[in-house]
Image (cartoon, rainbow, N blue to C red):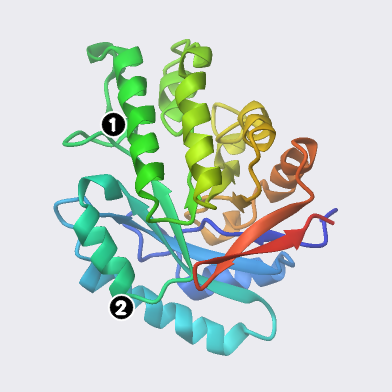
Amino acid sequence: MKYKNIVDVHTHSIHSFDGNDSVEALCLAAIEKGAKVLAITDHCDIDGKDMNPDVLCPAQLKDLNDCINKYSDKIEILKGIEIGQGIYRKKETEALLEKYDYDFVLGSLHNLENMEDFFFLDYKNYDIDELLTRYFDGLLELCKWGAFDSLAHLTYPLRYIVAREKINVDMNKYQDVCDAIFEELIKNNKALEINTSGLFMDMKDTLPNISFVKRYKELGGKYITLGSDSHYANRVCQGIEQGLDIARAAGFDSVTVFEKRQPRLITIE
């Protein structure tokens, strides 16, 4: 590792519906890779018909607390959760975050209201501009609500629309709404995530890419979080060095972690 301070604050264990390895396996992988900080942020897609936070959260937090007790001398482990589609169930989300003791909350939109995840859509049946307009408007609503710490994978639908389906998208159409999203993040002291998973998918880039990270910085953005979005232990910290390269190139000299929902800067070095 060319960087001393490696952090990965977007990972998924078996407590996520699509996770594959235990909390402990992820922690051991991060320790082996020399990471200083790991957050495990299991999926809580609050609008899912089978989602029950009172089943998910206690089991996940028990495993996290066990690993914190076991490995705190080797790595800082943060208790995280990724709240998907919180704007569709605001009261439920707020009650969940009041009830359970999380250090770090990712906010994301994986689907539009009453629709499937962007992963599953057959894009021949949709107006792409309408989908993306609704998506970015949803992110803006999410940021105005603000019940999270870092906005996850800003350009999530491009994984499937552009990279997989090879449909051209003029992102300039959405610059104004993205600027409004950034302004809300900045005003509310929220972070923007550099999600490195796309580096290892067809898009071969981060979500969002460096142009968006630079724009966030230009508008006054202070907080960047880094996450591999790993669903396997062997992918923990994957792409984090490239993410640090992008953060630095965009003008950031530190990345952010959240402890007890409060930001803490970690120098890029």
Amino acid type at image mark 2: Pro
Percent of width and height locating residue 176: 49, 21
Question: Quarter of the image containing the C terminus?
Answer: bottom right
| Residue occupying image coordinates x 67% and y 60% | 7
Q: Earlier in the sequence, mark 1 or mark 2?
A: 2
Nearer-the-camera pick, 29 or 5: 5
Name the residue carrying label 1. 120
> In the rendered view, does 255 fall on the left or right side of 93?
right
Relative to 77, say whether 115 is above or below: above
Direction bottom: furthest residue: 69
Q: In this figure, what is the number of numbered marks?
A: 2
Q: Which residue is drawn at 16% across and 36% down?
A: 114
Is 244 on the left-hand or right-hand side of 37?
right
**Residue 152 location in percent, x, y?**
48, 45
**Numbered circle sitting on residue 203:** none
| Mark 1, other Cα within 10 Å: few <14 / some 14–19 / many ≥20 | few
Residue at left offset 47%, top offset 86%? 66
Tell me the SS state at disc 2: helix
Q: Name the residue under label 2.
A: 58
**Amino acid of disc 1:** Phe
Quarter of the image where the N terminus is located: bottom right
Task: Give the vertical position of 4 relative to 177 (above or below).
Answer: below
Can you give x and y, in whole percent of width and height, for residue 166 in the image?
46, 14
Pick whichever, 120 or 156, lies toward us: 156
The spot of residue 55 in percent (x, y) is: 23, 72
**Residue at the image position 45 percent from the left and 54 percent from the top:** 106
53, 167: nearer the viewer: 53
Which label sits in the foreground, 1 or 2? 2
Label 2 Cα crowd, 10 Å radius (few <14 / some 14-19 / many 20+): few
